[in-house]
Image (tube, grey):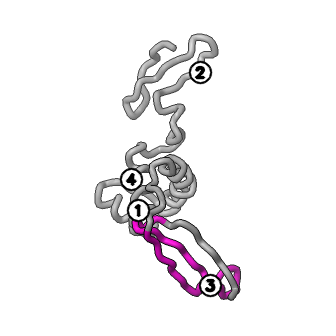
Amino acid sequence: MTKAGSDQQGRQIFRCADCGRRQTDRSTSAFSGYRFSDDVIALAVRWYLRFRLSYVDLVELLAERGIQVDPSTVFDWVQYFAPIYQDAARPHRHRVGCRWAVDETYIRMAGRWVYAYRAIDEYGQVIDVYVSER
C-alpha cells in the first residue's frame, strides 16, 4: 500500500501496489459507502435504540446540531446498523438476575388479538417473550 493523497473529508487514501485499488481506513468499516460521518450515523442509531425516538424526532435533534438528514435516511441506518449493534452488545449483557417479573399485554398481531407475555429480570433485560391466543 502506498499513500495516494486524501479524499474530500481529509482521510488518507491508499493505493494497492498489486491491483491499483484505492481505499481509506474507512473502506473496510461497516460505515463505508455512507455520505455522513461514522459519528453521526452511530449517534442517530444509538438515540433511536436507547430512547425509542421517532425518526422525525431524530431528524430534529440532528438539525439542532447543524446536520440535515431525511427521516428515510435515518430509517435505513437503523435497519442496517441495529442488528450489528445488537450482535456487538450481546457478549456484554448481564447474566440473568435472580429476581424477575412477568409483564402481560393484549396486542394485535397479523390482524388478530393475542396475549404477549415478557419475562424481565432485575436489570431490565428481556429474558423471554411468549405470545398466545389464550
Badge 1 local density, few (<14 within 10 Å), some, or many (20+)?
few
Whole-angstrom CA distance, mark 4 to mark 1, is: 10 Å
Secondary structure mostly taken by the magenta-highlighted segment of the chain? strand
- The magenta span reads 99-125
N-term-proximal mark, 2 vs 4:
2
Give the vertical position of 129 relative to 113 (above or below).
above
| Residue linked to disc 1 | 50
Seen from the viewer's position, the closer of residues 9 and 125 is 125
Q: Would residue 85 be counted in the magenta stretch?
A: no
Q: Amino acid at mark 4?
A: Leu
N-term-proximal mark, 2 vs 1:
2
| Residue linked to disc 3 | 115
Tags 2 and 4 in contact by the CB under 8 Å rule?
no
Give the vertical position of 20 relative to 63 (above or below).
above
N-term-proximal mark, 4 vs 3:
4
Tags 4 and 3 in contact by the CB under 8 Å rule?
no
Seen from the viewer's position, the closer of residues 64 and 98 is 98
Tags 3 and 2 in contact by the CB under 8 Å rule?
no
Element marked by disc 1: helix
Q: Is residue 41 left or right of residue 20?
A: left
Of badges 2 and 4, nearer the viewer stands 4
Of badges 3 and 2, nearer the viewer stands 3
Q: Would residue 112 be counted in the magenta stretch?
A: yes
N-term-proximal mark, 3 vs 2:
2
Residue name at image x 53 percent, y 17 percent: 15
Q: Amino acid at mark 1?
A: Arg
